[in-house]
Amino acid sequence: MVSQGRPERQSDYSRMPSHRPLVIDNGAYFCRVGWAGEKDPRFSFHNVLHRPRHRGSGELTSIVGDYDSGTVKLFDFTRSSLRSAFDGNVVYQFETMESILDHTFDRIGVDGAVVDHPVLLTEAPCNPIFSRTRMAELLFETYGVPSLEFGSDGMFSYAYNQRLGLCESDGLLVCSGHTTTHVIPMVNGEPIMEACCRTGVGGFHVTSYLKRLLSLQHPYHLNEIVWEKVEELKQEYCYVAEDYHAELSIFQKGGAEAEAKTKWWQLPWVPPPEKEQPSEEELARRAAIKEKQGQRLREMAFAKRSSKIADLETEIEGLEYLLQELDDAEDAKAEASLLGPSSFGSREEVQAALAKATMSLRKAKGEPVDIKKVEDDIPMSEKYPLLEVPNSLLTPEQLKEKKKQQFLKITTEGRIRAKQKRQEEDLQREREQQLEEERRLANPELYLEELRVRQAEVSARVDQSKRQKIGMASAGAVTSLTSGVSGRGERLSAVQKERMKLLTTAAFDRGKDEDTFGMNDEDWELYKRVGKDTDGDDEDDEDEAELARINIRLKELDPSFMPSTGLIQGAQTVIPSVQQRPLTAEDFRIPLGVERFRAPEIVLQPSMMGLDQAGLGEMLALALMRLPQHYRERVMKGSVLLTGGNSLFEGLDMRLLAELRMTRPLGATIKVVRAADPKLDAWRGASVFASSSSFQKSALSKADFEERGPDWLRHHHLKYSGGSLSNSFLTDNT
């Protein structure tokens, strides 16, 4: 709640004559209190109750109205919710109402529990008899007031403005308050309550709707979009559009007119401190530290490489010494005794280990390594000696060893062919890169444009491929769910089923004694057929690799290049990291454009916020229809008075004028006026009425209440209508 300060306690209560009435305008949002005959109320406060805890003792305390900074220091309001005595505009929580009346009488200066002045209390039009009875019982029995009178705030405002000459005795009263809006026909200054219309939309709902609109559009500023600030924005910037749809089209089209009607709310913003640029001494110090760290890393890497070279040299010396001993051995028994302590099973294994260690040593020293030459150092006849021996001369153990050597030979030859192919591909790639570099040097701009086009094509191809995969996976999942079958066969594609069929055929076509699959060259054709279902994956991998190379190349040539977004990985979209930038005051500005007239529009169109109620324009037409025919013309020839705090919106009078013209004959005279002070005119009218003789005649005394009881209010005729009010004005001010 907005901290407006608590009202000061009045000091002249004892000097007031006992017959002077106390006027209380008991509104759902504001409560205004003062003495009869005065022009303005003595004080006003928000008609709510807080129940905070004392920060020291932890006891609950009742605080009515606004609270100031001093009160916040003493009490904890974080867990205190606002309590209102009203449901709509009708009092129903009388315990809360009693706390509010305690605060009212204490601020006006009452000492003790008895109020020895008459009281005039405002209430809602057509207030339920139960609420009026409980209120009278509370004032008579708890505070001991000598007499009490009730009156409608809208009637008091109409009579006061009639006295000022703003409205006529016949017309329509439009009273829009905090929670409700009433339309009451007036004939000769008297309300026709049978034709009264009411809708449960008021200023509270307008503020709530505006707060909802701003919160949805600016979710990052929810802490700043609080009720109190939104209420201020509503009062300062909101207006009612004369033609709602035409006003919407202005903002839809944009342009200078929409920009002129847009207001800006600047949120609190503190510019970040500017980063100081490091001095030359600081840059030199950082460079020295970086160089020192790099030197340390280089020394560590050199020590590690030296240690590795030393270990490899020691290992090579040991292997060479072992081979020398094996050469000097006289028979197989001596060789077996030399190989026993080591982990090698034959001379060939020692030679292979020596070749491997030699190649590792050359790599560690940075010398070029010819893999083919190293492998060719050992002849095939020595590596696989059993391949040239006929099977008839071999024992069963040697036959198994021969099969093993045959498989190793095929694998080694295939690896050598693959390495040769990679070397050829590397040479081809180097030639292509050289040609590409020549084209770039010949025409850099054309080369860069072609590279961008190529990047877009490959990116689109990769994106499309991934989308298809996700679609196939989703379709498979849907098929499995809809068919109700969860077996593995239902989840396999046709290509995967063919692959399993080929593997099964290969396994059963061979002999049962031993599995020789893979020994012959024709067996590799089956592997190629089996791998057909992964050909698409290989192509996708190649596209992704090419796309990565193109992106790197474009980044080298154009530092401002950013890879295209939208590539799908799994079921999610790759969102690039947003480049951070320092926040400015523009990021803390909230525009108020359409919201300025969209929020107050709910008074005329409650359906916008989900309420199945009539709008203000419909209520005017409905109130006229309920009137008798001979009263209807008199009312329409009069004036339409707008009063209440929710009628202060700019353009509301013109909008109602347009609404009424649609229901009236062409050329009919319609007068729509706003009250002199829509917020205070109700209290001022009540003040004038309380100081007149009409108040003394119509007030209900405490003796009558004690004698006849609260039920007598059902039959008691309370004369608080506009007619008696106007007459009192005329008689007391002649």
Image (cartoon, grey):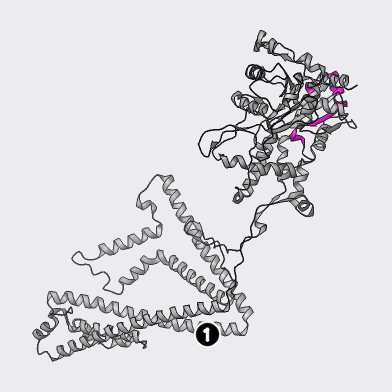
Q: How many marks?
A: 1
> Magenta segment, principal secondary structure?
helix
* In the foreground, 43 or 166: 43
Report the side of 584 relative to 480 (left or right). Answer: right
* In the foreground, 349 or 482: 349
Q: Amino acid at mark 1?
A: Gln
Up/down of 66 relative to 96, above or below: below
Q: Residue at x 46, y 52 (%)?
A: 475
Residue 529 in magenta?
A: no
Q: Residue at x 71, y 33 (%)?
A: 44
* In the foreground, 532 or 225: 225
Q: Is residue 515 visible?
A: yes
Q: Which SS class for mark 1?
A: helix
Q: Is residue 624 visible?
A: no
Location of residue 351 by image quarter:
bottom left
Report crowding for label 1: few under 14, some 14 to 19, many 20 or more residues within 10 A (C-alpha): few
Task: Pinpoint residue 181: horizontal percent, then vertical percent.
Answer: 72, 30
Task: Pinpoint residue 672: horizontal percent, then vertical percent.
Answer: 84, 32
Q: Residue at x 22, y 83 (%)?
A: 383
In the picture, the quarter occupied by the C terminus is top right
Task: Pinpoint residue 364: horizontal percent, then vertical percent.
Answer: 34, 84
Residue 644 in magenta?
A: yes
Location of residue 356 by image quarter:
bottom left
* Residue at the farthest top position: 707
* In the foreground, 260 or 111: 111
Task: Pinpoint residue 444: horizontal percent, then vertical percent.
Answer: 62, 81
- The boundaries of the magenta stretch are 622-648
In the picture, the quarter occupied by the N terminus is top right
Q: Residue at x 59, y 24 (%)?
A: 95
Up/down of 79 relative to 550, above or below: above
Mark 1 lies on residue = 434
Report the side of 52 relative to 11 (left or right). Answer: left
